[in-house]
Image: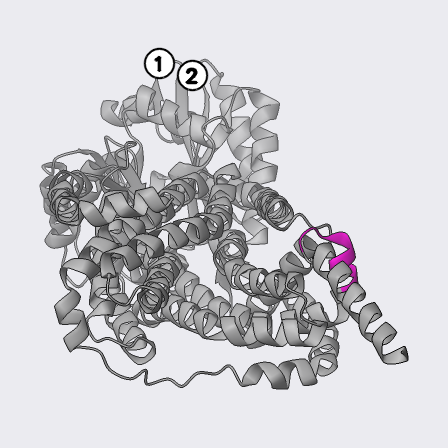
Amino acid sequence: MINFGKWVVKFRIPILIVSILLLIPAGLYYLHTRVNYDILSYLPSEIDTMKGQDILLDEFGTGAFTFIITEDTNNKEVQALVNRIEQVDHVKKVLWYGSVADLSVPVEILPDDIYNMFNDPDSNSQLMMVLYDDTMGADETLNAVNEIQSMVNEQQYISGMAAVLNDIKNLSQKEVPIYVLIAVVLCLIILSLTMDSALVPVLFLLSIGIAIVYNMGTNFKGEISYVTQALAAVLQLGVTMDYSIFLWHSYQENQRRYPDDKCRAMAHAISNTFTSVVGSSITTVAGFIALCFMSFTLGLDLGIIMAKGVIFGVICCVTVLPSMILIFDKALEKTKHKVIIPNLGRIAGFVTDHYLIFFIAFFIILIPALYGYTHTSVYYDLVGTLPDTMVSKIATEKMNDEYEMGATDMILVRSDLSPKLSRQMIDEIKMVDGVTLAASLDSLAGPMIPEEMIPEDIKNELKNGDYQLMLVESEYKIASDEINAQCDEISAIIKKYDDTGMLIGEAPCTKDLIEITNTDFTTVSAVSIGVIFLIILFVFKSASLPVILVASIEFAIFINMGIPAYTHTELPFIASIVIGTIQLGSTVDYAILMTNRYKKNRYQGMEKKEAVTNALESSIQSILVSALTFFGATFGVGMYSDIDMISALCILMARGALISMCVVILVLPSMFMVFDKLICISSIGFRNKGDKNQEHKHHFLTRHRNAH
């Protein structure tokens, strides 16, 4: 790789110019990348709930709806609001009491459940349902919801999944730029304390910033989730900063070898860095690739972006950053200062002297960590990711309180299902625990209300082509055990009358999400552990080291994910799936760094304790800086974000970096001390047999001479 290093040094100015020019197309493409705020759209397309969404859009021309509650408003004022809302682009229809039955029809002849669906006399409020001509997460739908929100006053509240997604969109667009700013400032502070130059942290961040723009500007799918958008930059910053630090330290080391030739020193630094960083980055990439095995394709979205981000980070580290360092060499020399944080190498002797204490502590802590890990609660309700002040969350609580509407779902059945069977099915569904309303066109029409009295446009909304649409309301909260059981019971009733029928909506989608992500958790964990195990096996050619290294980081993961069980903190569902994989892939590098040094020491003939102590002493500073920058990139975002899904993920990643750091510094050396003999026997490259033979020969000759 030395020739590559020489090439980079020779063409450093063109490399920097080209890298800056490439920011233009990458930046423009990133700005035009669509952001998807609908998490449920990442469910597998082959499940009934997702097929039903497509049918709803194709056959009925609607794919989303919201509810609006109006308080202390008469029918005339409601009608005026309905008329204004129906003029909004992509609003298909507004359903309210006046659209189901003519206002001249006496209230007494209406079925109670139909009247109560749209009216709450106790609070003097009315409910309307707004249908849209596109899907919940479509830009057109969210723009329409945004426009409607600007129309309503403080006595009118908008709820429903489309309203929730619009709130997430508005909040995310406001916060994401601040995430990057917070991560950059905290990383600058940490690097300023741990680096010997005031300018070099700026160059690190500029180089990584270029890699981030390249990564985000090469998303050929043309769309990313808001979770990926929020996390990608700070996560890429956190996991690739190591590479820049390694290059700088290698450059300084080679400057001492070649004090009069900085270009030669940098060429060797690039060569050394490329070899080391490629090996280190493989485990990180593998961790992110493991997310791609999720059936819930949000993992694919995040996994590909982050794996690509690590690759771009490596490329920029060995091309752009060396060019910057050489070009700004004079400024770097002028801004050099003493490292503020002292070298912590002396801790190494303490750890190896007391290794049995840390080894025993591993098993003592493991038990409560495992218990917490297996008892941490998660939630799936997307409304729960928003702060209590959001309008959609306030409206959802009002719907629950005033209309007992925890969830509203739809039933799709054949349009040729007879009125008799249709009514029987609806009557049976009404008997299910927690169902507050079940209605179809056939159940609306009857002896008291002839079908002729139902407006034609309402008929078209409920029966069209091959399908007819029915409405089900539940008092149960979405993602609760009660509503999941209710969905199963309603689906069984539907299949009894129409084996092609299906229940669709937020509640059944969330139920599918729970079932799918539970499986994904097992799959992703197994894949990430298996792949990283094989990588370590290949790198170290050892039967024991993969077990020791993976067990150490998994121990850190158990602690990290177990803490919420003891603090009674509920985590968003995605955290339980992705955090273990991200923490394993990102922080196993700490363990690999120390293991490489330990292996080299043992091969060179050092005794066990000396080899382990030296390995820890020489790597502790790099591990500390790496963990602190990862912590800095994520912790501030976690504390700032009002979107609980983003906040929880960042807090877990920040805490995980510190826990992994402590485990690698304290527990892993203890493992080496205890299992040194096993490691040497079961690994290639830990014993230099030639040196040992020479050593034995030397001892034999010495004793022979002394005897004479």
In the rendered image, residue 499 lying in the magenta stretch gets the answer no
What residue is drawn where x is 32% and y is 59%?
237
Mark-to-mark CA distance, 2 and 1? 7 Å
| Residue kind at label 2, given as amino acid type | Ser
Residue segment shown in magenta: 677-685
> Please, is residue 126 above or below residue 469 in the view?
below
> Please, is residue 677 above or below residue 417 in the view?
below
Question: In the picture provided, is 545 more to the left or to the right than 423?
Answer: right
Task: From the viewer's side, name the closer residue of 79 and 484.
Answer: 484
Residue 206 spot, x, y in % from top left:
20, 59
What residue is drawn where x is 60% and y is 61%?
600
Q: Quadrant of the N terminus?
A: top left
Task: From the viewer's side, name the closer residue of 514 and 488.
Answer: 514
Residue 15 spot, x, y in % from top left:
17, 45
| Residue kind at label 1, given as amino acid type | Gly
For the rendered model, the colour scheme is one colour
- Observer able to see residue 666: no
Residue at label 2? 415
Residue 465 spot, x, y in % from top left:
35, 14
